[in-house]
Image: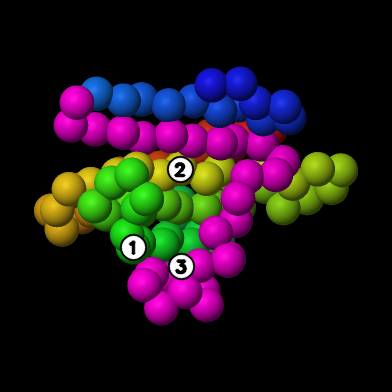
């Protein structure tokens, strides 16, 4: 995948699809708050503010994504948005475990 101001990527197989955007302007997922089809969970991942959203996907049965504010300091904030598709509740639970397992090194740009 090609990013403009961030590091983006995608891992895909016949049973798994996961994409990420790490940089200054990833989608913060706040637009899902008003959509009743999605659950939105505000919390912390690795001591950083996070948001996890889950609901129907356009191209998959269940979609879940996480937004983590990695660094909120000038001159440019840094955040991660990572999301994937799942075919079941167990798959969504697996995505959530993956999101909550994220760890960021100290001094991460």
Q: Earlier in the sequence, mark 2 or mark 3?
A: 3
Mark 2 lies on residue: 82
Q: Image quadrant for the C terminus?
A: top right
- Residue at 66% x, 36% y: name it: 23
> Looking at the image, is 56 positioned above or below residue 4?
below
User: Which marked residue is nearer to the observer: mark 2 or mark 1?
Assistant: 1
The answer to if 17 sits in the magenta stretch is yes
Mark 1 lies on residue: 55
**x then y, percent, for residue 9:** 49, 25
Q: Secondary structure at mark 1?
A: strand
Task: Write down the region rendered in magenta.
Answer: 14-40
User: Which marked residue is nearer to the observer: mark 2 or mark 3?
Assistant: 2
- Say few, some or many: other residues with alpha carbon within 10 Å of mark 1 (under 14 / 14 to 19 / 20 or more): some
Mark 3 lies on residue: 43
* 50 and 52: which is toward the camera: 52
Which image quadrant is residue 25 in? Answer: top right
């Amino acid at each position: 995948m090609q990013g403009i101001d961030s590091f983006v990527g995608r891992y895909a197989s016949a049973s798994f699809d996961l994409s990420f955007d790490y940089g200054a302007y990833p989608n913060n997922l706040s637009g899902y708050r008003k959509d009743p089809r999605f659950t939105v969970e505000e919390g912390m991942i690795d001591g950083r503010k996070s948001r996890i959203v889950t609901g129907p996907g356009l191209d998959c049965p269940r979609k879940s994504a996480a937004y983590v504010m990695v660094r909120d300091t000038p001159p440019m904030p840094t955040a991660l948005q990572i999301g994937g598709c799942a075919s079941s509740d167990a798959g969504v639970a697996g995505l959530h475990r993956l999101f909550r397992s994220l760890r960021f090194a100290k001094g991460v740009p």
